Amino acid sequence: MKSTYQLDLQDYLNFQMNHAANSPAVKKALLIQRFLFPIIMLALPLFIDSSIFGWIVYTIFAAGWLIFYPKYFYGHIKKNAKKMLQEGDDCSLYGTHELTITDQEIIEKSKNGETRHNWESIQKIVDTPSYFYIYNSNVSGYIIPKSKITQEISVFLQNKKAAI
């Protein structure tokens, strides 16, 4: 089965954001950063200003942090990922990709060359509304836009996902 499609910066940002949203390490970092600051803010009036006004101010800051920090956190990840992806010459990332899928392996050809992976080396397949992400390591993989592949490939990947 073969398919040809274009990948651009937005496709790679979507991959990075999906990975960040589902990564246990990122989730743990967000949890710690989200709750540590409000705990400190709520403890400060005990040492600095124990008036009711101090408690109110620190509580407002803590509540604001709890509510708005996740949006800032993921925005920061997206901004840094975009900077990294725009650095240097990433001709191998963007542009036309030709995907060939067989029962034994997955092959992707781009301007920069060809990559091959046996299905046994694939760690996981993530199925999102717009993409299939086929991970060949913890942090890298194939980005396959669902709108650019045939129904046959889509069904094959869903079956492979269930088997992995």
Image (spheres, rainbow, N blue to C red):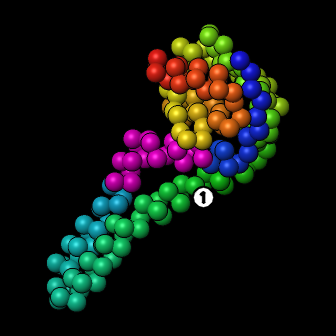
Q: Is residue 82 left or right of residue 36?
A: right
Q: Position of residue 157 (x, y in %)?
A: 57, 23
Give, as a three-letter code, the residue at label 1: Lys
Q: Main secondary structure of the magenta part?
A: helix
Q: Is residue 60 left or right of residue 71?
A: left
Residue 20 in view of the camera:
yes
- Quarter of the rendering containing residue 57: bottom left
- Quarter of the rendering containing residue 89: top right
Residue at the spot x=57%, y=45% of the render? 16
Residue 116 in view of the camera:
no
Start-end of magenta stretch: 14-31
Outermost residue toward the top in this view = 104
Q: Position of residue 33 (x, y in %)?
A: 36, 58
From the image, which quarter does the N terminus lie in?
top right
Q: In the displayed structure, would residue 22 be above or below residue 101?
A: below
Residue identifier under label 1: 79
Q: Position of residue 49 (x, y in %)?
A: 21, 85
Q: Is residue 91 left or right of residue 148?
A: right
Secondary structure beneath dot 1 equals helix
Q: In the displayed structure, would residue 87 be above or below residue 160?
A: below
